[in-house]
């Protein structure tokens, strides 16, 4: 198991600054998102599914797998800049 | 970073003059500016201000990528893009875009391209604050591919 910290942005900030999740090595991004909404509660499922996980430079696809240098990720809800 | 692209996430007031100077070019006869400001009304609610949340590293990468696309579409064009990070009152500038090209038609198109891409791709979120004391995060465009 690995511990990853997911930092919140936008609407997720209503729930704090972030969350730590225990994730098996090799877990997909899709599975991490599922673990996230399960931790937050089913009422947040749609928001999580509409969001993406990313690191500092790249948005991660849902079928990407967690690697050893992914100890911190960010969850990015739908954007509305400008 | 090539000198024809200048991108910024700022927590200080955005300056129109600096944007114009960044894209000025003796071979370019057109400079187009887009200035986005906080307005006082949104879907019937009186707005007092907006707090902008930004994922800065990814936002800078995305702004640069958008401008790179612009230089490919409008060869030789120059771009300056700045987005505010933090809280603004009604009337203050949230986003500033300057584009220069040799001729005006390309300049209008390129500037429009950048602001539309920012609206749908930039990792920025708005929390609106209302005169009744309440606040709300606005819905937006999903970054899911």
Image (cartoon, coloured by chain):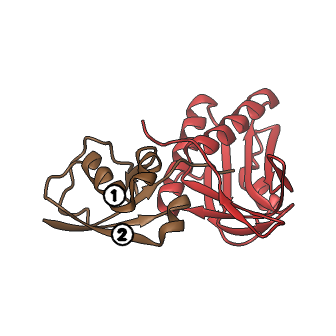
| Residue under the point 25% across and 41% down | A63
Say which quadrant the C terminus of chain B sits in. Answer: top left
Chain B tint as drawn: red
Q: Mark 1 falls on what kind of element? A: helix
Chain in brown colour: A
Which label sits on residue B92?
A: none
Q: Is residue B67 visible?
A: yes
> Disc 1 designates what residue?
A36
Mark 2 falls within which chain?
A
Q: Mark 2 falls on what kind of element? A: strand
Q: Verify CB contact (< 8 Å) between mark 2 and mark 1.
A: yes
Q: Residue B68 falls in which quadrant of the image?
A: top right
| Residue under the point 32% across and 56% down | A38
Query: Is A82 on the left-hand or right-hand side of B64?
Result: right
Q: Nearer the viewer, residue B101 or B52?
A: B52
Residue B94 x/y as whole percent? 74, 58
Residue A39 x/y as whole percent? 33, 62
| Residue under the point 66% across and 38% down | B116
Q: Nearer the viewer, residue B25 or A71?
A: A71
| Residue under the point 57% across and 49% down | A79
> Disc 2 designates what residue?
A19
Query: Is B17 on the left-hand or right-hand side of B79?
Result: right
Of the numbered discs 2 and 1, the one sitting upstream in the chain is 2
């Amino acid at each position: 198991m690995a511990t990853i910290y997911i930092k919140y942005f936008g609407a997720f900030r209503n729930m704090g600054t972030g969350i730590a999740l225990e994730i098996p090595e090799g877990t997909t991004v899709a599975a991490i998102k599922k673990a996230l909404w399960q931790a937050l509660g089913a009422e947040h499922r749609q928001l999580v599914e509409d969001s993406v996980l990313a690191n500092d430079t790249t948005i991660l696809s849902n079928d990407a797998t967690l690697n050893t240098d992914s100890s911190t990720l960010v969850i990015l809800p739908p954007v509305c800049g400008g | 970073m090539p000198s024809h692209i200048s991108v910024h996430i700022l927590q200080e007031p955005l300056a129109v003059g600096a944007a114009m100077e960044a894209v000025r070019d003796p071979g370019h006869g057109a400079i187009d500016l887009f200035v986005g400001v906080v307005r006082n009304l949104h879907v019937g609610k009186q707005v007092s201000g907006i707090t902008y949340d930004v994922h800065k590293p990814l936002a800078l990468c995305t702004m640069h990528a958008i401008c790179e696309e612009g230089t490919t579409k409008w060869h030789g064009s120059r771009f300056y893009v700045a987005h505010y990070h933090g809280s603004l009152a009604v009337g203050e500038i949230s986003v500033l875009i300057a584009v220069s090209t040799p001729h005006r038609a390309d300049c209008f198109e390129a500037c429009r391209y950048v602001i539309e891409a920012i609206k749908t791709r930039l990792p920025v979120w708005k929390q609106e604050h209302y005169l009744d004391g309440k606040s709300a995060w606005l819905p937006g465009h999903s970054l899911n591919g």
